[in-house]
Amino acid sequence: MTVVALLSVAPVIEDSMAGEVAKAVDALDDYDVEYETNPMGTVIEAETTEELFAAAQAAHEAVDADRVSTVLKIDDKRTVETDADAKVQSVEDHLGRAPRSER
């Protein structure tokens, strides 16, 4: 996979966003993408930007709110085949350890 992105979709509401965020994440299953959700968003991997944008749009539209905030950050590395795991592994190699605190 060559296109890696961080997607954050959230309703602008006072109460918990979890239910609506779950709808956005669930919408990704209809697309040919791999994803992993973390506390700050969802990392998505796709073969093409077209598939990535389609998945991101579906996630955005899945949220049922009067106002929805969506942020999409894309790393489209066009000359080298890579994936999200390889990007993390490269940081680990430079650190000599896992890129997280020991606490």
Image (cartoon, rainbow, N blue to C red):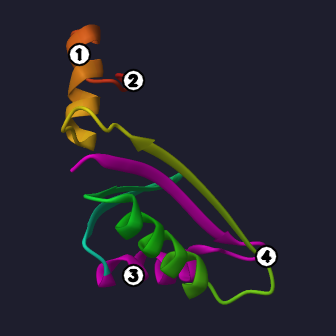
Q: Is residue 29 left or right of residue 8?
A: left
Q: Which residue is mark 1?
A: 97
Circles 1 and 3, Cβ within 8 Å, touching? The answer is no
Residue at 30%, 80% in the rendered image: 29
Task: Check disc 4 and report its element: helix, strand or loop.
Answer: loop
* Mark 4 vs mark 2, CA separation in Å: 32 Å
| Label drawn at residue 26 | 3
Q: Marks 4 and 1, Cα distance to the nearest angstrom?
A: 39 Å
Q: Identify residue for label 4.
A: 13
Residue at 80% x, 86% y is 66
Q: Give the total number of marks visible in the rendering.
A: 4
Q: Which residue is mark 2?
A: 101
Q: Nearer the viewer, mark 1 or mark 3?
A: 3
Q: Which residues are magenta?
A: 1-30
Name the quadrant of the C terminus.
top left
Q: Earlier in the sequence, mark 4 or mark 1?
A: 4
Cα separation, mark 2 vs mark 3, equals 30 Å
Task: Please tell me which residue is depicted at 66% across the width and 90% down the height of the picture.
Answer: 64
Query: Which mark is in front, 4 or 2?
Result: 4
